[in-house]
Amino acid sequence: MKIKLFNNLLLKVLSVITAVMLWLIVVNINDAVGSRPMRNIKVNVQGMEVLSAQGQMCRIEEGTDTVDLTVYARRSVLNDLKPSDFVVTADLQKNLLYDSMVKIEVSYVGNATVDRIVQSRENVLVSIEESVTEQFKVSVDTKGEPTYGLVKGSAIPAQTLIEITGPRSVVERINKVALEPNITGITGTMVRNCEVKLYDMENRPIDGTYLEYIGKDTGLEVTITTLNTKLVGISFDVSQAAPEGYGLNTITYTPETVTIAGIQKSINPVYNLNIPAEALNPDRQTGKVVQSVDISQYLDEGITIPDENDREIVVTMEIVPFESVSYVFRDDQIQYMNIREGLKLDEAEARMLEVTVSGLASDLAGVTMENITVAADLSQCGRRGVFTVPVTVTVPDKCHVPEDLQMTVMLVDVEGE
């Protein structure tokens, strides 16, 4: 009886052991150890504050601050894994190697058990540089055009200068700091918030990841105004275009009209831009003279020429020598002015004056003795005698006579007749 009971107990124990072994086999088949990839896990670089205290900065080489993980664990565990279950760090203070790489450490912080973790890279590549701060002017480059009939007036950024701090190699590449508001269809005054963009000498964008500056995350505001436009004529004062002894025979210029811009009350009374005499031929050239004149410098305050290409006017002039014609005036053709009481001209003396009139041939063609006036001023002759007196000659427009003409006269007493 005892032998039978013992045999039954042994069989039961063997059955339990067999069942456990079968269960383990089934579990290992259904929940075997496998692997799962975890892509692009961000590496948390620590210890930056240590470098900052030393006036340095750490710049991470692009693409080296992420790592791919391959996790080995049972299938039941793998199915529930998340990227947040892993902490990936690179500590500059503890694991900096050769001033150019930082060892990557991976930790699993989940509640399950993983067999092992294989990482795609061992180090983050870094560049440690001096930290510098420089000031840059903020420029505004607008995109698009306002509503038809309007042009952009002013575009003023909320901040005209910004300080940028970062690695020397990056800061020294910055050539331009720009705001680029879109002004398509705007009217009046508008405010736009714009991303702050950085460019190098070749107008290529600069990555601002390792730079610190105002507006990096929030942008900067730009206030844009619009102006009304008007088409007006252009005229030049040609009175001083030719040097002495020469005349302006012809003048042409292009364009002959220009579009100006300003607030409505400023441009309403303007119909023509009058360019002063000093703008033409400042070098006193002769012959065919071609000159470019920047007319924008002669605009009234508050008025602009919006198209930069219209600000330069090409002027072509033909400056030729004057021709001259001489006229002889007899005594009875000369007006004697301001003769003192008790004096008179000596009638026995024959007086004549030759006057040379110069000008362009086209202007001289209309000149006759009838439209020339000759007057001698005797106001300084207070007694009888022979005097040299100034003569004033009046000629038609665009004609010229010498300014220092004089003649000799003899005065006698009236009582001597």
Image (cartoon, rainbow, N blue to C red):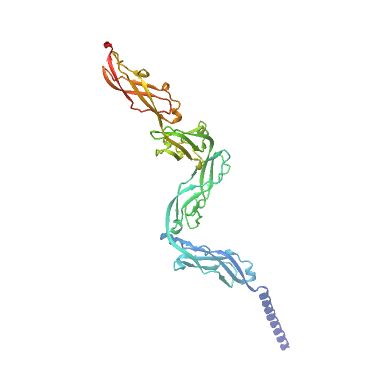
196 or 293: nearer the eye? 293
310 or 123: nearer the eye? 310
Q: Is residue 401 above or below residue 384?
A: below
Q: Is residue 33 above or below residue 160?
A: below
| Quadrant, the C terminus | top left
256 or 356: nearer the eye? 356
Q: Is residue 207 above or below residue 27?
A: above
Whole-percent x, y for residue 223 in the image: 51, 43
- From the viewer's perspective, is 83 left or right of 292? right
Whole-percent x, y for residue 391 in the image: 34, 23
Q: Is residue 413 visible?
A: yes
Report the number of numbered marks.
0
Whole-percent x, y for residue 130 in the image: 42, 60
Q: Quadrant of residue 320?
A: top left
- From the viewer's perspective, is 98 left or right of 88? left
160 or 144: nearer the eye? 144
Identified at 45% across, 65% down, the residue is 93
Whole-percent x, y for residue 222 in the image: 51, 45
Q: Is residue 352 above or below residue 139?
A: above
Identified at 42% across, 32% down, the residue is 239
Q: Is residue 214 visible?
A: no
| Quadrant, the N terminus | bottom right
